Structure formats: C-alpha cells, structure tokens
Image (tube, helix red, strand yellow):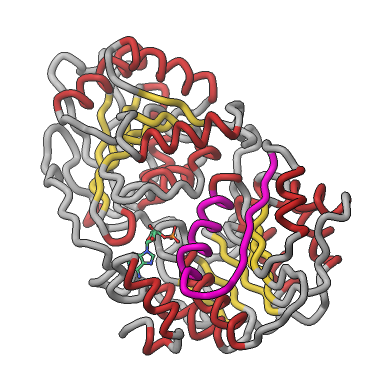
Amino acid sequence: MSFSSLGLSEQLVRATTDQGYETPSPIQAKAIPAVLSGRDVMAAAQTGTGKTAGFTLPLLQRLAENPRTGKGPRVLILAPTRELAAQVHDSVALYSKYMPTKSAVVFGGVKINPQMMKLRKGLDVLVATPGRLMDLYQQNAVRFNEVEILVLDEADRMLDMGFIRDIRKILALLPAKRQNLLFSATFSKEIRTLAEGLLDNPVQVEVAARNTAAESIVQSVYPVDQSQKTALLSKLVRDNAWEQVLVFTRTKHGANRLTQKLERDGITAAAIHGNKSQGARTRALADFKQGEVRVLVATDIAARGLDIKQLPQVVNFELPNVPEDYVHRIGRTGRAGESGHALSLVSADEGSMLAGIERLLKKQLPRKSVEGFEPTNNLPLKPKGKPDPSRARNRNGNGGGNGKPAGNGRSFGGKPGGRSGGRSQSGNGGQARRSPQRESA
Ligand code: AMP
C-alpha cells in the first residue's frame, strides 16, 4: 500500500516522501480514506502511531479539492497542550509545503497580539489550544463561520485538563454542517458522551489495543531505594553512554530537583513542566533535540504529545499515579516502528503502583539490578492480581531483553498494529480513570 493508492494528491505524496515515509501506518491506512470520504471519524490512536498525518494529509487534500477565498479558518484543530499544538502545526506546515495552504498555531502563555495579527491576515488551517482560542474569539480576533472541518486531537487529555467547557462553547459557535474528526488515546464514558453529541454516524478507526505498550519497547524495572535513585540514574546514563534520555518525575518540584542533581553530577539536564514559561519549555526541548542536553526531565502533562524522533531511552524516575500514564510515558520511545527501551526505578513504597501497571499490561516486567544499588527495602516480586503467566518473562534479576535498539528507518512496517476495530463497538467502554491530583500544564 502507498500514500498515492490511498487517494492522496501528488503534492501530498511528495511531502511524505520528503519525510522518508515509506508506507502509510495502520491508522493512516484507515483514517485517510475515511476523512477523504467526508465522513465523521472517531479514532482510537495514541501518539506515535502516525495519527497526525492520518488526519492532516486528507484534510489538506479536501481543502485543495474545494478552494475558497474567505478569511478562514476552514479547518480548526484543537489540541490540549502548547507543545502538541505546536507539533501538529509543524506537521500541517510540512505536509502542505507544496500547496498554497496557509496555517497558524495559537496557544496560551505567550503574547496574544502577534497571534491576532496572524489571524487578521487570513488562513486555512488553525491549530489551537481551547483556552487561548476562546480568548481570541472574545476579542473578535477570530470567527468560526467558515469552519468546514473540526479536529479534536487527544480529546481525552483535553477533558482531563478541564477544557470541556471551552470545547463546548467553541462547538456551539461552529457552523452546524461540518466534518468532525475525534482522536483520543482512550475512550472513557466522558469521551463517548462528547463523541455522541459531536459525531454523525462516524467511521470508527482503531489500530492498537488500548493500553497495550508497543511490542517494540523493551521494558524493565530496577528495584532501588528512593535515596539511591539519583545516583543510579547518573550511573546508568554514564555506563550506557546514553546521549538522549527522557526522564519522568511525578512532580514539578521533583523534576527541578533531579535536574539540579544531575547537573551537579556533570550530566547536562533540563526540566520541562507546567510552571516553566513557554520560552523555557521550547528552549529545553530544542536543546534536547539538538543533543546539547542529555537528559530531559519532564512531568506527565508537559511530556504529553512530545514528538522526539527516535528517542532510544525513557526512564521512569518515579512511577505515575495512574497506570495508563505509564503506557503514555513509555510511548515516547520506540516511536514510529523503531525499537526503544523504557526502564523504571522503583522503590518499595511504589510497589502498589507497579502492581497496578503490571495488571494493566497483563504481564510482569523483568527485574534487573546494578551492583551496589540493591535495595534494602525489597519490592514485591509478584504483582497482585496475577498477570497471565504465559506472558510473564524474566521474573527476576538480570534476565535478558537487553538487546540494542534496531532502528528501521521511517517505516511503520511489519504487523498491522494489533487489533483493528473497523466499526467495532467493543472493548473500550466506560472505564473512567484519572487521578484528581494532576499537574496542570
Ligand atoms: P504521531 O503519532 O502523529 O505523533 O507521529 C509519530 C511519528 O511518526 C512522527 O515522528 C511522524 O513524523 C512519524 N510518521 C508519521 N507517519 C509515518 C509513516 N507513514 N512512516 C514513518 N513515519 C511516520
């Protein structure tokens, strides 16, 4: 299968070739024809599946097929965080490089005036976070009467972050006749309610079982005392000569503290979290991408949607409170069909969080140890809730799974990404989750 066989124009195919994409990813293979057909789409897809191109390529084509001369925007893409909005906009710009399409991105935390100026010039595609978009609307800087296509990207996170009221206000302002695309990693009751009110007879697209970590990610657990975690992390970074590692902490304060300690150990590090200014976040990410910073320390929400190409290594310095966040975190590695490594430093007090994660994954993660860092307080080896024993591997100690990542270019290739739901109604129902004490980005 190729991008052109999915019905995309020569300009769009050329743009994907420039990116080195060989074949459409499973979500693209399903979403592209659905969006091109003009129908509403409800897609279960996580970051890393190629979902952004899955909606961006066909919507650009729809705009091109039906040129208009208004001031726009004709397409509105809502995203939960500034980083994700910026990345989606980068994709729009990349894929439309051989087309006259004009696009812009607006989000909070930066001056509003330059955004107003951009909007005044007119545009086709607007990518926005909901709060800033409402501010702009209230200041008469944007109108929605020409919107033909609405995309809600990472809708579950938008609800988690409390954007539902802004989203509902925006929906009420859009023309009734339009195409709606809803992308979400999970389908809780709230998302289903939103989808029911929003989508008209949608094509349902689902490519990977919910909460299943990509097979290409090698995962392991290092039981270690809390007090030894920083020293162990420094050792691992050095011994393995990691040049680019994303490390997760639970709190903003923890992220700052760890960054300082690593720097003191002579390892370049930067923190990215909701208390940092937009400038500081953008700078930290850019330094990390360029290899000037070896360790990027992030909280869950700040890391949401980060697309760092071929990130080989993710470390959970602390486990997340919500097991599903573990899957999101480790999804930062092994992107786009590459393989990656995710390891977790787990202290005895995190035993129940680990058990929750292993229950969700339905497997036990291999335990590993480093000489001199064996914990004095032991971690239970067996998770409660009995994972499927046939899938449990390497229950203890130094067992395998230590192969080096084997990159395979820019192809999603291989397996079609597991379960493919077509119009399946099954499976995802209802399980609302969510921790009440999340960071706000
Ligand atoms: P996303 O899930 O949209 O965040 O995309 C994840 C990554 O996959 C991004 O770095 C994209 O550039 C990359 N990507 C998207 N489509 C393809 C493709 N068909 N082949 C290879 N890489 C892709």
Does 41 sit left or right of 371 as displayed?
right
Q: Can residue 197 be seen in this view?
A: no
Displayed-image quarter of ligand 1: bottom left
Q: Where 161 sits versus 413, above or below?
A: above
Does 140 sit left or right of 292 as displayed?
right
Residue 11: give x, y in percent of width and height.
Answer: 44, 80
Q: Where 136 sits versus 336, above or below?
A: above
Q: Where 59 sits versus 245, above or below?
A: below
Q: Foreground: 288 or 124?
A: 124
Residue plotted at (25% across, 39% down): 220
Residue 145: give x, y in percent of width and height.
Answer: 83, 72
> Residue 245 sits in which quadrant?
top left
Residue plotted at (26% across, 72% down): 415
Residue 104: give x, y in percent of width and height.
Answer: 63, 58
Q: Foreground: 53 or 125?
A: 125
Q: Foreground: 383 or 143?
A: 143
Residue 92 within the segment the image draws in magenta: yes
Which range is magenta? 84-108
> Residue 391 sits in which quadrant?
bottom left
Residue 197: give x, y in percent of width and height.
Answer: 76, 71
Quarter of the image that includes the C terminus: top right
Residue plotted at (36% across, 24% down): 269
Number of numbered labels in the structure image:
0
Residue 96 within the segment the image draws in magenta: yes
Q: Is residue 251 visible?
A: yes
Q: Foreground: 172 or 7?
A: 7
Residue plotted at (38% across, 29% down): 351
Quarter of the image that includes the N terminus: bottom left
Does 258 sit left or right of 76 as displayed?
left
